[in-house]
Image (tube, helix red, strand yellow):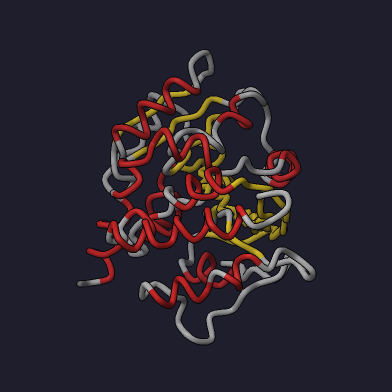
Amino acid sequence: MHEEDKREQLRQTFEQAAERYDRARPEYPEALFNDLVTLAGLTPGDRLIEVGCATGKATRPLARRGFRITCVELGAELAAVARQNLAGFEVEIVRSPFEEWEPPDPASTEPASLVYAATAWHWIDPAVRYQRAWQALRPGGHLALWAAEHVFPEGGDTFFEELDDIYDEIGEGDPPGTPRRRPGELPDQRADIEASGLFEVTAVRHYDWEQAYSAEEYIELLSTFSGHIAMAEWKRQRLFGEVRRRLALRRDHSLRRGWGTVLHVARRKD
């Protein structure tokens, strides 16, 4: 399967888990949004465009800060949940692949001050995504990208290493040599952004946090990841059964998962 076909197939999987996605996926740190507003020079009332808002995890914090937001979301179910979550805010949700979405005519609507994507940019076709963002922005506008990822703090929970044998058993283990990044070690996308020739990266910031999960909460989280949604049912049942069994043996019946993200802010070149 071609890489673009595989990407398209996997990004469609989230439609099967819209409500679950909203419950299980983590909220982003408030410090990230405070920094983003400052780094992008945003003022309440500015127009923003979000790429792939899903259920609105990264939309609400900016809508609460007084920005007008257009969300471009591919999935009908995700968009429906987002509309419920964002009722009462100045937010418009447009159902469309970002690759095909046409920004409003600048003569009728002012261009956006910010285009941003939270845990969504990697799903957009690399051949066109920076050009699309550039076209939607005003001169001097900004692009912001970040994604929530698993990090492994020193002295953190060993549950994930202990579960490797089950992932290997069902044929879903990470390839040999796959790094397990510590907080602050996630790679940044500066080179990719600047290789477009359309943006200059002006800031890169790291954020890390930790979240506790019961067995059912963690299984619900896993059930929002495209790779787990696409797994054969017997593999999911084997994996989820082991999560339940092993956490039942722990005194507090829970695990701690480390999260990290890297905020990239880049200015549009004119």
Decide if residue 13 is on the left or right side of residue 175. Answer: left
Write the residue at 59% across / 26% down.
63
Query: In the rendered image of this protein, does residue 75 appear above or below residue 143?
Result: above
> Which residue extends farthest front?
249
> Could you tell me which residue is drawn at 50 percent across and 22 percent down?
86
Q: Residue furthest left?
A: 1
Outermost residue on the top side: it is 88
Residue 201 picture location, percent across and down? 63, 61
Q: Is any part of residue 76 visible from this angle?
A: yes
Mark yes or no: residue 134 visible: no
Question: Number of callouts in the render?
Answer: 0
Which percent across, then down, holds residue 34? 74, 39
Establish if 55 lies above or below 171. Answer: above
In front of the other: 219 or 123:
219
In the image, taking residue 144 as reference, residue 19 lies left or right, namely left
Name the one closer to the observer, 197 or 178. 178
